Image (cartoon, coloured by chain):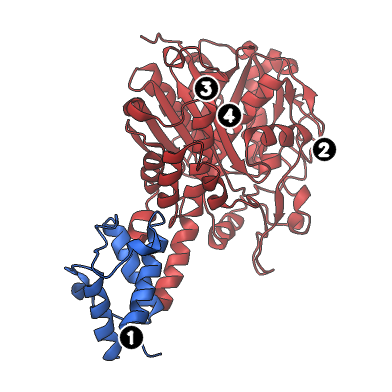
Amino acid sequence: MFLDKEKIFEVVKANTLKVLPDLLADDVTLDKNLSDLGANSVDRVEVVIYSLEQLSLKVPTSELHGIRNLRALVDLLHRHALSK
Amino acid sequence: MADRFSPVAITGMGVVCSIAHAIPEFTNAIREGRHGITNLPVDENHSVRIGALVQDFVWQGWVESLKSSEPCIYARARKVLNNTTESTRLSAYAATQAVLDAGLGELGDAADEIGLIVAGSNLAQDYIIQNWLRFRETGRPNPRYALTFFDSNQVGCLSEILSIRGPGFTIGAAAASGNAALFQAFHWIRSGIVRRCLVVGACIEFTALDLEAFAILGAACSGRWQEDPGRACRPFDQAHEGFVWGQGAGCVVLESLDSVSGRRILGELVGASLLLDGNHLADPSQKGEIRAMQFALNSGGLNPGCIGYINAHGTSSPLGDRTECAAIKSLFRDHLANVWINSTKSLTGHCFGASGVIELIACIVQLNNGFVHPNRNLDSPIDRELKLVSVKAEPLNAEYALSNGFGFGGINSTVVVRKGLTS
């Protein structure tokens, strides 16, 4: 499966909405970070792990720390998708 | 200030088990002697192929039903229960029922004075096994696994959903867990530590592994009744062959009398005991059971002659049933003709963590509605001197009832309850 950034964001967005059921779909944009959207530390891990699983990606845990917003997360996942 | 014998009010109740999803349905089900035991979805290699499963429970459904009436509880429950164990969802459902039944709703500032005790240990057995399998396959557990496998996570989840901020923890005492939690809450309220306390009997999600292990010890029913689930659980009957596991959760709201202030009192917890046999095995002790019942009566300033009904531990285990009969006969001697005895487990199966709480609810329901429910499958009683209810319900006119819970590891606990004030 070829993964472009748009496809990856779709997956991340769907998981964000699954973990944070009070959000509206339009709330989830690339320049937001998960904390701003109301995610606690465990919610953030949930969004990332579900996304990794659905995209069949493996990313070392250390690289997942310090991600500033959803754009940075999508970029990181995209880099790993390309190097697979 | 509470005196030595002051009772504790029961102001709210909630239940979900194989025979009911709410108190009115539970009342009708036990009156009619309905049972919830069916075949488990396992193959013939398993020794235990029966259980009393909660049917048709969809957590999103009941959470959605709170949307307009309890918007705050709704919003928190929807989030907290989204990725957790089924046992936690059942506990949350029973606890929310009980809080609303007590007329408490959103607790606000009162939340600081409410305690929460979740009864039962090893609640997440099935969740742990499922995560092990997930880990073996994908290299990762559920992202919430590290939080969720702790039994105490249920305390956190319920305290968040219901906004409870007093003392709280879990209590594990095997099959006596429910009564042990009631014992603790009773003393918290009597001693003024809290004015109100929720006691939640939680569902232990047993796995095929656990049930097989119980079968090896001869504790779980694993023999001829596997093909005839409706007849498998038969406390005090000569053909009893071990306990049948039941899923379920129950909750009661306990309060000091001055905290009730004019609200409805469903019943009173008047005595409780929790005592050890000094024995880590599964075998029950007649002496230990007598001590537990006697201590509970003493703590309420009562004697055996006050009791009109006993909700027996009665698991359908041959040795357990015989030992409890002997203990009751020894303590109640001259009063045996006045004491009805049944076992709710003949209908719900053995709900372990929840059984003490569900059986307290059964006591209140029967005292207040004037009946004792059938002892299902009691075709040939092992004892003819005890007033065991037959397979039909009987009228009950009693003020006080006693409920036993005896756990593996020689943990004996009894609670004594008084019927509610008639309005």
- Residue linked to disc 1: A4
Q: Amino acid at mark 4?
A: Leu
Describe residue A73's horizontal placement relative to residue A19 as left or right: left
Q: Amino acid at mark 3?
A: Ile
How far apart marks 3 and 1 lie (CA) works out to 60 Å
Chain ID at mark 1: A
Residue B380 is tagged as 2
How far apart marks 4 and 1 lie (CA) works out to 59 Å
Disc 2 crowd rating (10 Å Cα; few below 14, some 14-19, many 20+) is some
- Residue linked to disc 4: B360
Q: Position of residue B368 (x, y in %)?
A: 67, 20
Cβ atoms under marks 2 and 4 closer than 8 Å: no
Q: Are marks 1 and 2 on the same chain?
A: no
Q: Colour of chain A?
A: blue
Q: Which chain gets the red colouring?
A: B
How far apart marks 1 and 2 lie (CA) works out to 72 Å
Task: Name the N-terminal-most of marks 2 and 4.
Answer: 4
Could you say whether the residue bearing mark 3 is in a helix, strand or loop? strand
Residue B10 is tagged as 3
Q: Position of residue B301 (x, y in %)?
A: 51, 10
Disc 3 crowd rating (10 Å Cα; few below 14, some 14-19, many 20+) is many
Extreme-left residue of the structure: A66
Chain ID at mark 4: B
Q: Are marks 3 and 1 on the same chain?
A: no
Q: Amino acid at mark 2?
A: Ser
Cβ atoms under marks 4 and 3 closer than 8 Å: yes
Query: Which of the two marks, 4 or 3, is nearer to us in this view?
Result: 3
Q: Amino acid at mark 1?
A: Asp
Cβ atoms under marks 1 and 2 closer than 8 Å: no
Chain ID at mark 3: B
Taking depth in this image into account, of A4 and B341 the one nearest to the observer is: A4
